[in-house]
Image (cartoon, grey):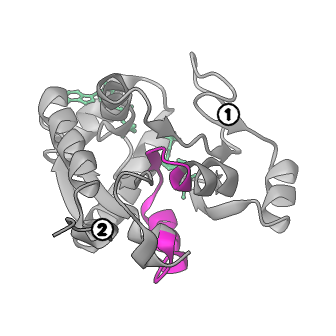
């Protein structure tokens, strides 16, 4: 299939969202699903331990390091990275067939993972259907407040995530869109608008009017 056969109504969009831990990605993406119920959230594999309330197979596939390495070596990941001292990976099967089948798919992955996706999808059909969104907090102090307020990390993990946030936050200019999560309602509206706009891209349409 060549890019010229792509029509905006036939294929889904792949939305890649990255931003520092605690910015509110999960909260806003969860709310977005209520606006767009068919939107599929790619379920990543991770070696991190589940947080209270997280469900295996829904929030993540929680796997052992041995299983993660087996999946990686079998080529099952579209991308993978070590993030905050754990491994995370996106399963190919979560993405490709769904997008080409007409479903919108959202990836919540870190900056290194987004770079890998950008590189591997360069000049591909899936790349044409992919949009990168950087999701940031209003400020670093607010990020710390949210991370602490969530109450899911040890002090050591909070400090590691805040240290990493400074590095991640300089990557915003690599993305197509920037959402600053001041309020959940506005961030959901902005992300919805981006998703709708991807379907209107001229690049994805090959059929004009019958004139
Ligand atoms: P991430 O998925 O980016 O790590 P979360 O969605 O877990 O972040 O959000 C971190 C914390 O911040 C949660 O306790 C969440 O309820 C809170 N939060 C998210 N968005 C906002 C916002 N706009 N204003 C205030 N608190 C927020
Ligand atoms: P958390 O442990 O808070 O759920 O996620 C920590 C970080 O890992 C976040 O920045 C999140 O975007 C990232 N992440 C989650 N899944 C994946 C994945 O499959 N690949 C990559 N590269 N990062 C991921």
- Residue at the image point whose x is 28% and y is 31% from the top: 146
Q: Is residue 46 left or right of residue 126?
A: right
Q: Nearer the viewer, residue 110 or 160?
A: 110
Q: Is residue 4 left or right of residue 138?
A: right
Q: Nearer the viewer, mark 1 or mark 2?
A: 2
Q: Can residue 111 be seen?
A: yes
Quarter holding the C terminus is bottom left
Label 1 secondary element = loop
- Residue at the image point whose x is 28% and y is 54% from the top: 199
User: Percent x, y for residue 97?
Assistant: 62, 53
- Indicate whether residue 106 is drawn in magenta: yes
Q: Nearer the viewer, residue 96 or 4?
A: 4
> Distance from label 1 to label 2 (Cα)?
48 Å
Q: Is residue 100 left or right of residue 21?
A: right
User: Percent x, y for residue 102?
Assistant: 48, 47
- What span is colored magenta in the figure? 99-125
The residue labelled by disc 2 is: 207
Q: Which mark is residue 49?
A: 1
Label 2 secondary element = loop
Dot 2: within a 10 Å radius of its alpha carbon, few (fewer than 14), some, or many (20 or more) residues?
few
- Indicate whether residue 74 is drawn in magenta: no
Q: Can residue 86 be seen?
A: no
Quadrant in which residue 168 is drawn = bottom left
* The furthest residue to the top: 53
- Residue at the image point whose x is 49% and y is 37% from the top: 40
């Amino acid at each position: 299939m060549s890019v010229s056969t792509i029509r905006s109504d036939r294929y889904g969009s792949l939305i890649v969202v990255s931003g520092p831990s605690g910015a509110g990605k999960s909260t806003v993406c969860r709310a977005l699903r209520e606006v767009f119920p068919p939107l599929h959230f790619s379920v990543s594999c991770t070696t991190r331990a589940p947080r209270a309330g997280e469900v295996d197979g829904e929030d993540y596939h929680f796997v052992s390091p041995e299983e993660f390495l087996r999946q990686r070596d079998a080529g099952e990941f579209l991308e993978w990275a070590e993030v905050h001292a754990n491994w995370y990976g996106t399963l190919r099967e979560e993405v490709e067939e769904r997008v080409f089948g007409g479903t919108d798919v959202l990836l919540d992955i870190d900056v290194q993972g987004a770079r890998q996706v950008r590189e591997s999808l360069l000049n591909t059909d899936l790349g044409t259907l992919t949009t990168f969104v950087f999701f940031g907090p209003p400020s670093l102090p607010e990020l710390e407040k949210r991370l602490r307020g969530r109450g899911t990390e040890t002090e050591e993990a909070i400090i590691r995530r805040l240290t990493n946030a400074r590095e991640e936050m300089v990557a915003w200019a690599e993305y197509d869109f920037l959402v600053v999560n001041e309020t959940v309602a506005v961030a959901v509206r902005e992300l919805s608008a981006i998703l709708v706009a991807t379907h209107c891209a001229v690049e994805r349409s090959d059929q004009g009017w019958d004139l």
